[in-house]
Amino acid sequence: MEKRKAADNWSAEPTRAFRVRVLRQDGPAQPSYWQRFSIAWEPDMNCISVLQKIAAKAETIDGQRVAPVAWDCNCLEEVCGACTMVINGRVRQACTALVDQLLQDRPEEIELQPMKKFPVIRDLVVDRSRIFVSLQKVRAWIPVDSYLDMGAGPRQSQDVQQLAYLYSKCISCGCCLDACPQFIKIELYREPGESTEAYEARLREANYRAFMGAHAIAQVDLFNSNPIGSMTANERLDALIAEGGIQVCGQAQNCVKVCPKGIPLTTAIGRGGRAATKHIVKKLFDR
Amino acid sequence: MAKPSVMIIGGGLAGSAAAMKLAELDCAVSIMSFAPLKRSHSCCAQGGINSVNELTRQLGDHEGKHFEDTVYGGDFLQHQPPVKELAEWAPRIIDLMDRLGVTFNRTPEGFRDQRRFGGTLYRRTAFAGATTGQQLLYALDEQVRRWEVTGHIRKYEHWDFLAPILDDQGRCRGCVAQDMITMEIRAIPCDALVLATGGCGLIFGQSTNSLACTGSADSRLVQAGARYGNGEFIQVHPTAIPGADKLRLISESARGEGGRLWVPRTPHDPRPGQDIPERERFYFLEERYPKYGNLLPRDIATREVFKVCIQEGLSVQPDRPCVYLDVTGLPRDVLDRKLGGVLEIYEKFQGVDPRITPMKIFPAVHYSMGGLWVDYEATAQGGLRIESPRHQHTSIPGVFAIGECEYQYHGANRLGANSLVACLFSGLTVAPGIINYTTTLPAGLAAEQSSTLFDRAAYKENSRFQTMLARPTGGPSVFSIHAELGQLMTKYATVIRHNADLAQAYERVSELQEEAEACSLSDTGQWANQEVFFARALEDMFPLAKIILKGALARDECRGAHYKPEFAFPEITATDPIDRRREAVEWCEHFEENNRKWLKTTIATLDAEGEPRLTYEAIDTSLLAPRPRLYGILGGEIIEEVWKEREAAKQLAGSR
């Protein structure tokens, strides 16, 4: 509340402009560079409205005409996960990054950078297909027999539902991955003459073998706790102990600190680790 | 024989449901989306999904009542067989979603919990916290991923649909699309094209819609000759948070769980909402509509909020219109377990805890009841033959439409929590009809068509793209034109409409359309050029904006979300019983006369100059006779009494 009050006082100067520094990059394998913009302050701004203003003006603080900054967004209410970027050094969604609060913490300027662990496509747009490859790898779905009418799903206690809901709120934004020291950026470039399909297949293969990260480990717990999902728990545990699996986790615990949805990722990693150990032992004896 | 190939445009609830069902039926499925499917606008749906359930059944509810509430709430503007079928499928659809792992809230005994939503007296709405759309979408996204791994579904994520490819007979044989990163334009053959592209909120500038909801895909289909139905029916949701970039929805579930709308009795009372004593609060919906209270259909609730703020001057704040949505009286457990998601949104964006302080809200454009016209085939029992190739088929052979982008289920006003069920129903049931359509294709499958058909289509879009990049500088910016379009549409074509305003708005929108075609791009690059996609979407907003305005201008009546005060029926004001009865008789006669004229679907098409042409089509009301929609209007009891007598007399006359 204290913060809010201070921001209100600050807003008594409506003509004030503030500066925004953006790390830009024209395309993959291109050098990155900073550009500064001056934005007229208005009430209730967030980083989305800042980027909209940059696009509409397309002019730097020095009056240089530039192409609008490219960035991803869709829902603007922190449910779609699209607008994730690094704002004042912290990975988060641009929509809930409110300008007054940011200026309160750092009045001189707001700094926008693309996520650091994903290849830049252009400016603040990154390629996060790796997130979805790891969801393929851990088979994050309920393998129902068919979509025919077979009646309701199994009954569940409120506690089980509440826990599952916590995990299933994951918006696949990639914050937990960007903050993870064990999650190493993979960047492959298109070969001359390579088709989109061939490039994507090559990238997918590399992503498939690399560390899956906290979000995917939590999804294993989600689906293995589901009564139908638990029937195929071993498949997910196999993926969890394969190359790029849970053993790569270094327990830095950064993931849980940056998750915008408050998902208990370290709890999921702990549970995943125990399940993985049991699974390995069981496999030894089943041989 | 080769498998039929189906291209789905849009990866929200409807598109994903269609994709997984088509994959199960062994079609070669492709699905195209602006973004990864999981980031589609369906994730913004909050409150829940309606169906009759075991609990409501024991209180006398049945599918027929869900059908009736939907039709009555929609002011009888829907063809009835599709709605009947929808209501019958709804319980099974929720069962399926339950099996797919959707984290529906539970009762202490472990059953799915339900809450009440607007326009019904039953607790029909299943929900997963207050992010039900997100949870449903994720379950489908997961199923699509499952089929992607087995090679049944191919995704085109970060692609924009540009146009259908029609052969000489006007039959769809594929589509042209553009990769939003590499900017490659490609013609992709398919035997059936399914549009599942959602709403068109961006035409109104700011709305509760996501930024992908431009309506451009619908517009591109209309420009290719498709018919568009009931475009003028736009739902304005009563409760949203005003914002600089977006109007964020506060779900109807906040009221479903017991939240109340009120304003201070003293205009602009400066005290914080929580400090204003009970007796100084005006619960305007509860006082005026004792039966439904805070859970009226959205069109009526929205008009009441408007009325209380603007006509009666009782807005909470003097500088901007808003009313309180108060959930502070609800138990903490209900707030956290059932409404957490929406309350978080309010807290994150307003910096105020709605558990302690009443929320300040105002209506916002939310949903398009209108959309691409689609066909259906009724059975003798008044339901649907869903395996019919006509099911969900647009007026262009080979193009189907499902979800919010079509017009079929909600009439003049959609009930809360009916959109998710309509998306899933149309998405799941479109598959068998598509397969039957593709097995009877004249001149073979798309893959067997001459390559010149596809080359020509790609060439045309490529030229349009290059022309855009080559536009001279110095013209207006796409963003300023979009801002003006949005302001015009919001001001003149939302809650209260007047013919003079609509006519004026139409003229200005026509001028803006020309300006948009001449606007300059500040980005002329050939890599991930977002401005190109927005500029093209903006141009394509105009045909739909004109369809909305023209439809609204032509429709001289009040029906559901379409409200023109000039044509509102007078309420019954007489106090003398004889006068009251006479007024009620006149009211009923007026109602019948109006229905003869306007109980019709508006069908819009574009003429050779790109201007909308309107025609009207009779509505199938064979299952439930239209009757006055009397949610708490003044004198409603006497109108209802007179109406019933007249109906009984008619029946008697008919049976003689």
Image (cartoon, coloured by chain):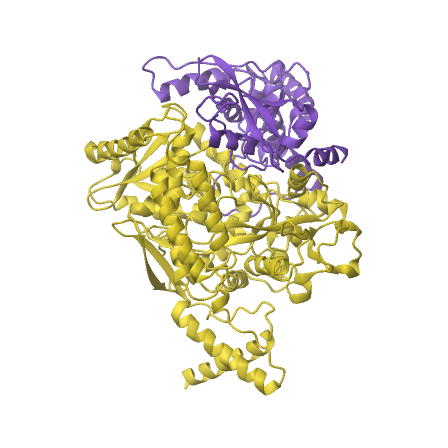
Q: Quadrant location of the N terminus of chain B?
A: top left
Chain in purple (letter): A
User: Can residue B395 be spotted in the picture?
Assistant: yes
> Would you identify the image quadrant in which residue B80 lies?
bottom left
> Would you identify the image quadrant in which residue A246 lies?
top right
Which residue is depicted at the point 23% across and 46% down?
B170
> Would you identify the image quadrant in which residue B166 lies?
top left
Residue B253 horizontal/vertical position (percent): 63, 50
Residue A30 horizontal/vertical position (percent): 44, 13
A2 vs B609: above or below: above
B281 vs B219: above or below: below
Q: Nearer the viewer, residue A125 or A181?
A: A125
User: Can residue B374 be spotted in the picture?
Assistant: no
Residue B32 horizontal/vertical position (percent): 40, 34
Q: Quadrant location of the C terminus of chain B?
A: bottom left
Q: How many marks?
A: 0
Q: Nearer the viewer, residue A85 or B15?
A: A85
Q: Nearer the viewer, residue B620 or B280?
A: B280
Residue B10 horizontal/vertical position (percent): 43, 39
Which residue is depicted at the point 58% across and 67% down?
B631
A99 vs B628: above or below: above
Image position of B423 (left or right of A223): left
Chain in yellow (letter): B
Image position of A242 (left or right of B530): right
